[in-house]
Image (spheres, rainbow, N blue to C red):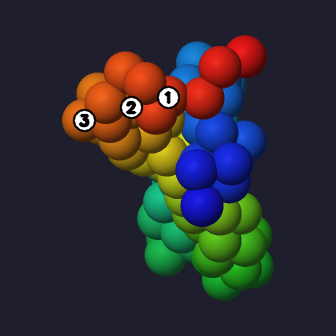
Amino acid sequence: MIKLLEKIGQNPQVSLTLFLRGLGLFVIGLLFIALGYFYHHLWQIIGIITLALACLLAAWGYVGIFANRWLNILYRTRPTNKRPTK
């Protein structure tokens, strides 16, 4: 389990970037849905697809951030002699 957390949470800056891009795409998807409300309904379809992609991207970034933080908590509470060496 620790190895998986290390793999997923190895770069929190990249995870934050993915999360923020997903958040931005989410806003764009909402704008497409609002545009479809006033104009043609196909804009709403594009908005729903964009929302789905944005949720996946933001979730992947959030999992990376969460894994990094959880790993830091585990390492902080682990005794010094049981920490893995690199």
Q: Quadrant of residue 59?
A: bottom right
- Label 2, on which residue? 75
Other residues around mark 3 within 10 Å, as few (<14) / some (14–19) / many (≥20): few
Q: Nearer the viewer, residue 50 or 41?
A: 50
SS label for mark 3: helix
- Label 1, on which residue? 83
Q: Can residue 23 be seen in this view?
A: no
The picture places residue 17, in percent across and down from the top left corner, at: 61, 26
In this rendering, the answer to whether 4 lies above or below 17 is below
Q: What residue type is labelled 2?
A: Tyr
Q: Do the residues labelled 2 and 3 touch (CB within 8 Å)?
A: yes
Q: Which of 36 and 83 is in front in this view?
A: 83
Q: Which residue is drawn at 72% across and 42% down?
A: 7
Q: What residue type is labelled 1?
A: Arg
The picture places residue 61, in percent across and down from the top left corner, at: 58, 44
Label 3 to label 1: alpha-carbon separation: 10 Å
Q: Do the residues labelled 3 and 1 touch (CB within 8 Å)?
A: no
Other residues around mark 2 within 10 Å, as few (<14) / some (14–19) / many (≥20): some
In this rendering, the answer to whether 54 lies above or below 14 is below
SS label for mark 1: loop
The N terminus is located in which quarter?
A: bottom right
Q: Residue at x 68, y 54 (%)?
A: 4
Mark 2 or 1, nearer chain start: 2
Q: What residue type is labelled 3?
A: Thr
Label 2 to label 3: alpha-carbon separation: 6 Å
The picture places residue 9, in percent across and down from the top left corner, at: 60, 37
SS label for mark 2: helix
In this rendering, the answer to whether 78 lies above or below 14 is below
Q: Are marks 2 and 1 in contact (CB under 8 Å)?
A: yes
- Label 3, on which residue? 77
Mark 3 or 1, nearer chain start: 3
The picture places residue 56, in percent across and down from the top left corner, at: 65, 63
